[in-house]
Amino acid sequence: MPPTDLKPLRTPKAIAEAVDRAVAYTPSTDMHTHLYTPAFGSLLLWGVDELVTYHYLIAEVLRTNRSVSSEDYWAMPLARRAEHIWRVLFVENEPISEARRGVLTTLAKLGITAGPNGLAEAREYFRDVTVEQHVDTVLRLSNARSVVMTNDPFDDAERAVWLSEPDPDPRFRAAMRIDLLLNSWEAATAKLRAMGYPVSPVFTRATYAEIRRFLDDWAERMDPLYLAVSLPYDFTYPADDARSRIIANCVLPFCRERGIPFAMMVGVKRLINPALQLAGDGVGLWDMRSLERLCAGNPDVRFLVTVLARENQHELCVTARKFPNLLPFGCWWFLNDPSLILEMTRMRVELLGFSFVPQHSDARVLDQLIYKWAHSRALIATVLKEKYADLAATGWPLTEEAIRRDVQQLFAGNLEAFVA
Ligand code: HDL
Ligand code: ZN
C-alpha cells in the first residue's frame, strides 16, 4: 500500500483512485462460507468440476436444456455433469448469468484463458495442483485474510473429523450451525441421544440442560465465532413450537453466557422443487416483527442477520437503526447479484453509515472465493465512490487515510469487533 496522502481529496477522479487502492489492498474476513480446511478431506470442495457443477448452475442448466431432466442429470458422474453444464451454459448459450460469469472470472484470475475449451484447459491446470497449494493460491488471489466455515455437529462426516482433533488452520475459523436442532427437533432428539445427550421430545428442564450441554461441548471443541442457523421465511418468534422453546431456553442463554452472537439467516422456502436437491430452495418474505422482538427482548445478545428476500432489505436496515445489538450482513444467495448488491449497499450506507458487513461469499467451492470477492469488491467500490464524492461535494476534507479506515471496517473490522 503506497503511503497515504493526508491532503483532502477534492475531485471524483482522485476519490475513485483512492477507493480503488483501499478496496484492492484491504484483506477481507469472509464471515460465511461452506469451506473447510484441507484436514476435513472431501468436505472441502475445490477444482473446476466442482466449480462448474455448483448448485446455482444446476438450476440454470435444467431450465436451459429441458431435454435433460434432473433425474438424468443426477444419474451422471461428476465429470459428465460438468461437461453437460459447460456445453449447455457456456458453449451453446452465452455464459451471461452471474454464476456463469463467476466461473470465468475465477478461471481468468487463475491464468486459464476462458473460452469454449475452458473446461479442458482448466482440468489441465488442476492436474498437478495439491489442495494445500490451492488454498494458498485462492486466499492470495481473493485477498481473504480469514474465512469462516459452516460447521454442523449433526453432520456425521464432519463430526467424525472434529472428534479426530484435526490440525487447526488459523485462516479458517469455525461457526457452529444448528439447523437440525432448530428446524427438525424430532430428528435432532434421535441424533442427540445417539451422541450421548439423553433428551426427550417433551421439553423438560433436563432436556434443556442436555441441549445446553451439547452446545457447550461443541463450542469447546469448535471455538465458534458465532452460533448460526438458516430459518424459513415463516419463522416466528415467540411461537408455540420446539424452535421457540429451544431459542428461549438454550440458544439465547448460551450466546449471552458464551459472549458470541446468534446469526440468523432468514427467508428460505425449503425445497420448492425437491428434484433439484440443493438447487431446489426458493425464497419467501419474512415477517420481521420476530426480529424486533428478539432484539428488543435480548439487548445483551448480539444478532448477526441476513435476510433472503429483496423486499425485506429496507426493513432490515431500519430495524438495525433501532437496535445496536443487530448487525446486518451480506447479500445472501439470490441477492448475490450486481443489481441487488448495488441497491442493498447504497441503502445500507445511506441508512447505517459504515455500521454493517457488506458481503460474505457463501462459497461452497474453494475457487469461488476468487470471483465472489472480485465481483463484490468492484461493486462496493462503485458505491463508495458515489458516496464519498457526495461527501466531498459538501466541502468535507476527505482523506485517503479515512477511506482506508472505513474500508478496513467494512471488510473485517465490523465483524471482528462484533464477535470479540
Ligand atoms: O443455508 C445456507 O447457508 C445457504 O447459503 C445455503 O447453503 C444455500 O444453498 C447456498 O449455498 N447459498 O449460497
Ligand atoms: Zn450459506
Image: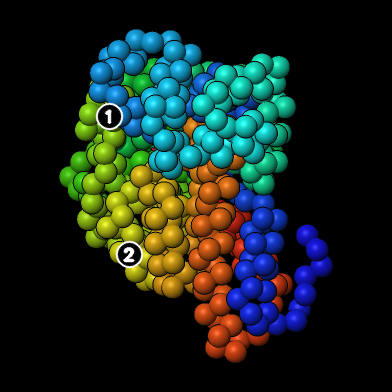
- Disc 1 residue type? Arg
Which color scheme did the rendering employ for the protein? Answer: rainbow
Q: Which mark is residue 63?
A: 1
Cα distance between the residues tagged 2 and 1: 31 Å
In percent of width and height, residue 113 lies at 62, 32
Q: Nearer the viewer, residue 224 or 192?
A: 224
- The image quadrant in which ligand 1 is located: top left
Q: Image point 58% across, 36% down: which residue?
A: 106
Viewer-proximal residue among 346 and 356:
346
Tell me if mark 1 has few (under 14), some (14-19) or many (20+) residues whose alpha carbon lies within 10 angstroms of its own. few
Point out the tag, 2 or 1, that comes first from the N-terminus.
1
Q: Secondary structure at mark 2?
A: helix
Looking at the image, which is closer to me, 340 or 250? 340
Q: Is residue 403 left or right of residue 239?
A: right
- Identify which residue is drawn at 33% across, 48% down: 308
Vertical order, 359 against 137 (above or below):
below
Q: In the rendered image, which quarter is residue 117 located in?
A: top right
Badge 1 element: helix
User: Which residue, given by chain and number where applicable, does mark 2 sit on?
Assistant: 314
Q: Farthest residue in the bottom direction?
A: 395
Q: Give the quarter of the figure containing the C terminus.
A: bottom right
Residue 344 placement: quadrant: bottom left
Identify the residue shown where x is 57% and y is 19%.
Answer: 120
Instruction: State the residue in front, 77 or 111.
Output: 111
Look at label 2 and name its amino acid: His
Looking at the picture, does residue 33 appear above or below residue 261? Answer: above
Q: Position of residue 237 (x, y in %)?
A: 25, 51
> Which x, y percent locates residue 129?
70, 21
Q: Is residue 56 left or right of residue 358?
A: left
